[in-house]
Image: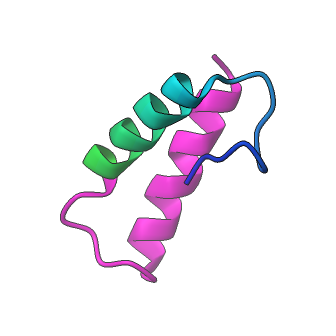
Amino acid sequence: MFTTENTTGYTPEQLAALNAELAERLEGLEPGTDEYYQAEKAFADEVAGR
């Protein structure tokens, strides 16, 4: 999850959009599994490169 505490330079609206996109990507994955973690990390890496 993206928050004002773990990101810089994003508005609350941008963070909400990122979190919505992340939720879509994680849909159907079981929290706590390797697959879930890998998908979450891949998205965070993608966002960092934007």
Residue numbers of the magenta segment: 26-50
Q: Is residue 41 above or below residue 35?
A: above
Q: Nearer the viewer, residue 48 or 4?
A: 4
Relative side of 27 to 47, left or right: left
Quadrant (top left, top right, bottom left, bottom right) of the N terminus: bottom right
Quadrant (top left, top right, bottom left, bottom right) of the C terminus: top right
Picture residue at 68% right of the left edge, 24% below the top: 10
**Quarter holding residue 30:** bottom left
Q: Is residue 29 magenta?
A: yes
Q: Taken as a whole, is the magenta stretch helix, strand or loop? A: helix
Q: Is residue 37 magenta?
A: yes
Picture residue at 68% right of the left edge, 22% below the top: 49
- Locate residue 24, reporting x and y percent: 26, 45
- Locate residue 7, reporting x and y percent: 76, 39
- Which residue is farthest top? 50
Q: Is residue 49 above or below residue 40?
A: above
Picture residue at 77% right of the left edge, 49% below the top: 6
